[in-house]
Image: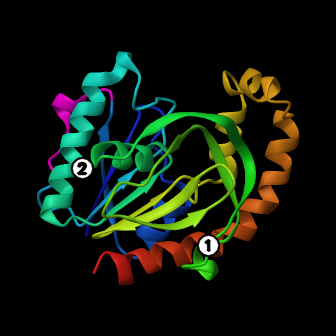
């Protein structure tokens, strides 16, 4: 089975989601967002995974790349390719199908609570967040998780999209928290070292939830 990962160069680690897919027998191919001319097509792909990004879908600087990914996801949806979209990936899906994406008045970075009446056993709880944008869920899709900031997950035909990061591992969080990410966190009043230390335990706690979410996606949504 083949899973196509769409992410930015140097930041395309599928983390816990990828680990579960690998356990279930998936092999991975990658499309780097910066190089759409080199992308592999969605033909014969069994699953597509859209990862997060430092980008926003409304930036003029990456308008061509956004348009190319919109075409990719529309083609995937038309072909019925099961798609799991995370953070920027969820925003891209919303943008592609008529929803809005805009700057949020409340950034969410760190561990934040998510509520779900539709699937509380799968989606409710604390998840790693790292975003400055908020989206509206397009018509024809179903909101399945929220919090005070906005929609946190929605579903569609063979689609699950989450604003939060179920894939987050300690390595991913450490990478995002160091280097250029450290001043970003400090501007938000977050101690990078503390975030990394407390995340190690949280990741362990959420690993099983991520595996269950992937299993549900494959068994119930993608089928």
> Disc 1 designates what residue?
116
Quadrant in the picture for residue 105: top right
Q: Return the x and y of residue 147 as percentages of the image width and height.
A: 66, 58
Q: What's the residue at 57%, 66% (across, down)?
A: 145
Q: Residue furthest top?
A: 61
Q: How is the image coloured?
A: rainbow
Residue 35 on the magenta segment: yes
Residue at image x 82%, y 25%? Answer: 186
Q: Position of residue 181 (x, y in %)?
A: 68, 27
Disc 2/disc 1 C-alpha distance (Å): 26 Å
Instruction: Determine whether 46 is above or below 71 in the image.
Output: below
Around disc 1, counting alpha carbons within 10 Å, would you say few (fewer than 14), some (14 to 19), or many (20 or more)? some
Quadrant assignment, res 60: top left
**Which mark lies nearer to you, 2 or 1?**
1
Give the residue furthest to the front: 139
Q: Secondary structure at mark 1?
A: loop
Say which of 133 and 129 sits in front: 133
Percent x, y of residue 169: 64, 54
Q: Assign the C terminus to one quadrant of the image.
A: bottom left
Q: Which residues are magenta?
A: 34-41
- Kindly state the secondary structure of the residue where label 2 is placed: helix
Tell me if 219 is positioned left or right of 18 in this view.
left
> Reading the chain from its start, which is encountered first: label 2 or label 1?
2
Which residue is labeled 2 in the image?
73
* Residue for point 35% across, 73% down: 25
Of 99 and 36, nearer the camera is 99
Badge 2 crowding class, 10 Å Cα cut-off, few under 14, some 14 to 19, many 20 or more, is many
Q: Main secondary structure of the magenta part?
A: loop
Rendered-image quadrant of the N terminus: bottom left
> Would residue 19 be found to the left or right of residue 42 on screen?
right
- Of residue 100 and residue 37, the one placed in the foreground of this image is 100
């Amino acid at each position: 089975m083949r899973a196509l990962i769409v992410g930015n160069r140097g930041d395309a680690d599928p983390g816990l989601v990828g680990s579960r897919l690998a356990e279930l027998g998936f092999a991975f191919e990658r499309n780097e967002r910066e190089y759409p001319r080199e992308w592999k097509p969605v033909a014969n792909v069994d699953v597509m995974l859209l990862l997060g990004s430092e980008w926003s879908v409304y930036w003029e600087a990456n308008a061509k790349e956004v348009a190319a990914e919109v075409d990719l996801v529309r083609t995937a949806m038309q072909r019925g390719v099961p798609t799991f979209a995370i953070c920027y990936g969820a925003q891209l899906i919303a943008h592609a199908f008529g929803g809005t994406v805009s700057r949020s008045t409340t950034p969410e970075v760190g561990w934040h609570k998510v509520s779900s009446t539709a699937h509380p056993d799968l989606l409710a709880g604390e998840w790693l967040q790292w975003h400055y944008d908020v989206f509206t869920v397009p018509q024809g899709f179903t909101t399945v998780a929220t919090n005070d900031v906005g929609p946190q997950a929605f579903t569609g035909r063979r689609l699950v999209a989450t604003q939060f990061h179920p894939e987050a591992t300690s390595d991913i969080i450490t990478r995002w928290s160091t280097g250029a990410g450290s001043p970003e966190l400090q501007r938000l009043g977050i101690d990078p070292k503390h975030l990394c230390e407390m995340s190690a335990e949280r990741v362990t706690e959420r690993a099983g939830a991520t595996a269950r979410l992937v299993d549900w996606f494959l068994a119930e949504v993608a089928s």
